Amino acid sequence: MRERVGGEERMTDDVELDGSQGEGGGQILRTGLALSLITGRPLVLNHIRAKRPKPGLMRQHLTCVQAAAQVGGAQVSGAELGSRTLRFEPGPVRPGEYRFAVGSAGSCMLVLQTVLWPLLLADGPSTLHLSGGTHNPMAPSFSFLQRVLPALLAQTGGQVTLTLLRHGFYPAGGGEVRVDITPAAGGLRPFSLMQRGALREQYAECLHAAIPRDVATRELTALGQHLSWGTPADQPDQLRNRGLRTNEGPGNALMVTLAHEQITEVFVSYGQRGVTAEQVARTVAQEVRAYLACSAPVGPHLADQLMLPLALAGAGEYRCTELTEHSRTNAQVISQFLPVDWRLAAHPDGGWRVGCGG
């Protein structure tokens, strides 16, 4: 059914999503909420996070729902911890200043992913104050989004500035982030990202708070060996040991940044109890080597995140190193809201081409 919403003609019938489809995780919820706000179509989500060890809404997912409800003045049922069913009826997106707190070590970067795209299409700027985890396993880190997102968004006409006020690691949390969003005038523009361009800079850094400095040294030493980058003592600018304030921990993240002319990619591995420093280094080194083995500019984690701006722009393309189940699931969810003609195919130069029209 169509009717006028905020001066525009929109589809107003419900979109019903099965949270057990595809990868069956929280991304279905976040993409569904973002597109519900953008299109004005009510969302019904069943079997939330059905394929996770603890199905249903956890703290960070509930905060995503609450944030989306505030931004869109939505009516919501099922917004409670553990809920596996949700109904979300959005109103018009309202730009402004918002504060969203996860209330645990859950990722506040996932909250940003939920409301960023609606606010980039709003009729005024917004500022978000987010608190919770900033560097979490199974979620994009603040460092990843800060280094990757602004340059990519600039191609679409939007602008976002991320400022870290305090790190937040699992299990303590307590991170604080400010995000300033300037909408894209006239909507997001199509973009093309098919080549990396020349390598401008590559470096690794170990963030650590309230853990022995020797752990960071061992991680960087092992990583330097895996990537043939030397040792922290010989290459302190390339293998950076970054001790943080002890009240920002305990926590530890080992990160590699590869900055090319057309794109920056960031790879992260986290220290955990029972996992040696050498294992942490090996994990991130394997991801870096896999990325470098293919000439595609977009890594596997960024690939699924770029699908939404590509679809909202209505056209464009990028090449990624692999097409994960996360990406395929995201494409399916987007297609239930928007008339997107996805074109997914292996690229002759390696990796996959992701394109769309509609």
Image: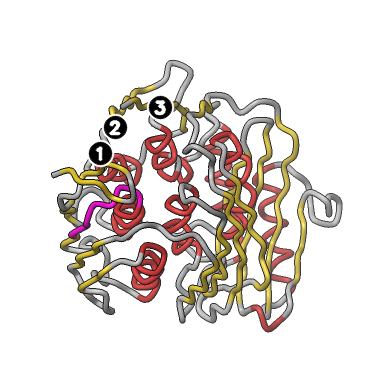
Of residue 282 and residue 142, the one placed in the foreground of this image is: 142
The secondary element bearing badge 3 is classed as loop
Toward the front, the furthest residue is 7
Q: Is residue 343 above or below residue 41?
A: above
Cβ atoms under marks 1 and 2 closer than 8 Å: yes
Amino acid of disc 2: Val
The residue carrying mark 3 is 315
Label placed on residue 239: none
Q: Which residues are magenta?
A: 38-44
Label 2 neighbour load within 10 Å: few <14, some 14-19, many 20+: many
Q: Which residue in the rendered view is the most extreme toward the right? A: 234
What is the CA distance from the residue labelled 3 to the residue labelled 1? 14 Å
Residue 158 pos. (x, y %): 56, 43
Image coords of residue 245 (percent x, y) = 73, 78
- Quarter of the image that includes the N terminus: top left
Q: Amino acid at mark 1?
A: Ser
| Residue on which the image places disc 2 | 340
- Vertical order, 259 against 92 (above or below): above
State how far apart marks 3 and 2 are (Cα): 9 Å
